[in-house]
């Protein structure tokens, strides 16, 4: 994944290019939720912890979580 630059905020939703993918990882441009702490975001940490989002839930496995809008 390419590094997103500047202004990342925990809880923010951004578009990210998730290519190239490995194994079963999702590999395309899609919205992601930033779950990394703002203290790491503000110092320019070299990685960013994200949660890929989708509007299409294909099944109801226990690994899928519905995120409601505010």
Image (tube, helix red, strand yellow):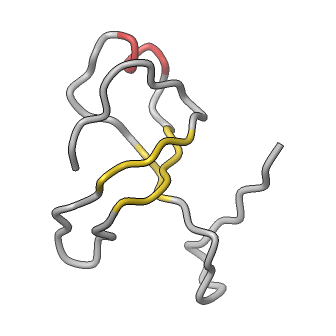
What x and y, as percent, mark residue 12?
Answer: 57, 34
Position of residue 60 in the picture relative to residue 2 (left or right): right
Look at the picture and state if 5 lies above or below 19: above
What x and y, as percent, mark residue 15?
Answer: 44, 48
Residue at the extreme bottom of the image, as rendered? 59
Position of residue 67 in the picture relative to residue 50 (left or right): right
Q: Nearer the viewer, residue 44 or 39?
A: 44
What x and y, as percent, mark residue 4?
Answer: 31, 34
Q: At 19% across and 77% down in the image, what residue appears?
A: 23
Q: Quadrant of residue 28?
A: bottom left
Q: At 71% across and 57% down in the image, what residue appears?
A: 67
Position of residue 31 in the picture relative to residue 64 (left or right): left
Q: Nearer the viewer, residue 70 or 17?
A: 17
What x and y, as percent, mark residue 30?
Answer: 43, 59
Look at the picture and state if 45 lies above or below 18: above
Position of residue 37 in the picture relative to residue 55 (left or right): left
Q: Quadrant of residue 25?
A: bottom left
Look at the picture and state if 31 lies above or below 60: above
Instruction: State how many labels appear.
Output: 0
Q: Quadrant of residue 53?
A: bottom right
Q: At 22% across and 50% down in the image, what residue appears?
A: 1
Q: At 83% across and 42% down in the image, what residue appears?
A: 70
């Amino acid at each position: 994944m390419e590094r997103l630059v500047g202004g990342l905020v925990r809880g923010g939703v951004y578009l990210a290019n998730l290519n190239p993918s490995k194994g079963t990882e999702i590999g395309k441009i899609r919205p992601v939720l930033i779950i990394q702490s703002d203290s790491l975001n503000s110092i320019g940490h070299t990685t960013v912890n994200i949660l890929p989002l989708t509007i299409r839930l294909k099944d109801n496995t226990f690994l899928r979580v519905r995120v409601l809008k505010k």
